[in-house]
Image (cartoon, grey):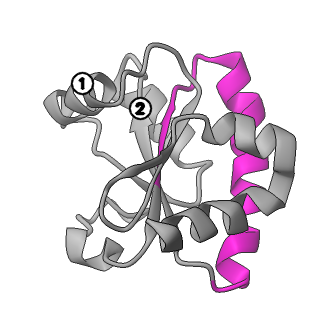
Amino acid sequence: MGKDGVDVSAESLRGKVVALYFSAHWCGPCRAFTPQLASIYAGAASAGHALEIIFVSADRDVDAFQTYFAQQPWLAVKFSHAELRQRLNEQYGVNAVPTLIVLNADGCVLTKDGRGDIARLGDAAIPQWLSKAASH
């Protein structure tokens, strides 16, 4: 869903690198990483990079989800879609938050350590992901 709560079509993600951001409001490291990720996301958008981030919440209730998502500039899996959120956690082996899984336009995993990439490379992580995506 978008910031306005309206569903976003999968078609709108076509041709983009998609990062799944597994995070939660109750998680201190998540709250510390989110502003850094938001800054990098804004830079990528202003540079015209084909990147989208989707928040996959591990929050315990809808109020915490809504409060935390309000601080994020990207898309989210609706909190009410608990089965989808659980399936994504299982599919990508997410055992802790924050985790940033980066996928190419075909849905293949480029990295399961997007957070680590950002810690090491900062803004340069985005061009690296896009380069990897182009070579897949």
Tell me where residue 93 appears, x and y as whole percent. Answer: 37, 21
In this view, the residue farthest toward the left is 83
Q: Which residue is mark 2?
A: 57
Who is closer to the viewer here, 89 or 27? Answer: 89
Q: Is residue 28 magenta?
A: yes
- Label 1 secondary element: helix
| Left or right: 77 in relation to 7 | right
Q: Which mark is residue 98?
A: none
- The CA span between labels 1 and 2 is 10 Å
The N terminus sits in image quarter: bottom left
> Viewer-nearest of labels 1 and 2?
1
Q: Nearer the viewer, residue 136 or 112?
A: 136
Q: Is residue 120 left or right of residue 112?
A: right
* Residue 114 is one of the magenta-drawn residues: no
Within 10 Å of disc 2 (Cα), the crowding (few <14, some 14-19, many 20+) is many
Residues rendered magenta in the picture: 19-48
Q: Position of residue 109 (x, y in %)?
A: 41, 47
- The answer to whether 26 is drawn above or below residue 1 in the figure is above
Q: What is the three-letter code of the residue carrying label 1?
A: Gln
Residue 125 at x, y = what percent?
73, 56
Among the two numbered marks 1 and 2 on one chain, the one whose residue lies closer to the N terminus? 2
**Mark 1, residue position:** 86
Of the 4 image quadrants, the one containing the C terminus is: bottom left
**Where is residue 56, by image quadrant?**
top left
The residue at 44%/62% (across/down) is 3
Residue 41 showing in the rendered view:
no
41 or 65: which is nearer to us? Answer: 41
* Dominant SS type (magenta): helix
Residue 23 vs 117, above or below: the answer is above
